[in-house]
Amino acid sequence: MSLTSILSAEAIDNAIKDCQDPDTFCYKKFFQLCGLSQKTPQEIKDVFRLLDDDNSGFIEESELKFFLQRFVPTARVLTEKETKSLMSAADDDSDGKIGVEEFQAMVLS
C-alpha cells in the first residue's frame, strides 16, 4: 500500500507546495489540502501505518521531522519548531509519541 492508493498524487503535491517554505507547515491545512481529513477512519489508520516508519505503533518526534518526505521524497524536512508543534497538537497523553487514535483525532479536528 502507498499513500497514493489513499490520496491523490495531485492533492499531495498541492499540500506539499503550500508548505514548501520553512515554518509554513500547518497540519490542519495540510490534511485538508491532501484530502486526508475527508477520509474514513480506516483510511486514516492506513495512512498512520505508512507514516510509522519503524512500525512501532507510534509516530515519534524523530519520524515527524521527515513527515513531509513520507508524502513526497523530495519534500523538505520539517523545522524543529514545526516538528514540536505537530507533536504537541497530537500527543494528548504527553508520552512523546503519537498513537493511531491521537493521529485520527488530530486529522479529524
Image (spheres, rainbow, N blue to C red):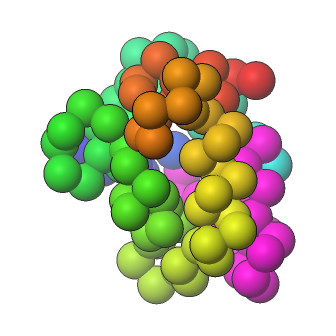
Q: Is residue 107 visible?
A: no
Lateral position of residue 33 relative to residue 105, left or right: right
User: Is 24 colored magenta in this rendering?
Assistant: yes
Does residue 62 lie above or below 17 as drawn? above
- Image quadrant in which the N terminus is located: top left
Query: Which of the 4 image quarters holds residue 59?
Result: top left
- The spot of residue 68 in percent (x, y) is 53, 66
- The spot of residue 98 in percent (x, y) is 45, 35
- The spot of residue 87 in percent (x, y) is 59, 46
Does residue 87 lie above or below 37 as drawn? below
Q: How many numbered marks does the figure carry? A: 0
Front residue of 38 and 99:
99
Does residue 6 lie above or below 23 as drawn? above
Query: Which of the 4 image quarters holds residue 17?
Result: bottom right
- The spot of residue 35 in percent (x, y) is 66, 40
Lateral position of residue 20 relative to residue 48, left or right: right
Q: Residue at x 60, y 24 (%)?
A: 92
User: Is 85 colored magenta in this rendering?
Assistant: no
> What residue occupies the far left of the structure in this picture?
55
Magenta extent:
8-28
- Image quadrant in which the C terminus is located: top right
Q: Residue at x 38, y 63 (%)?
A: 62
Front residue of 24 and 5:
24
Q: Residue at x 69, y 23 (%)?
A: 108
Front residue of 11 and 103:
103
Q: Residue at x 79, y 56 (%)?
A: 26
Front residue of 104 and 74:
104
Q: Is residue 46 visible?
A: yes
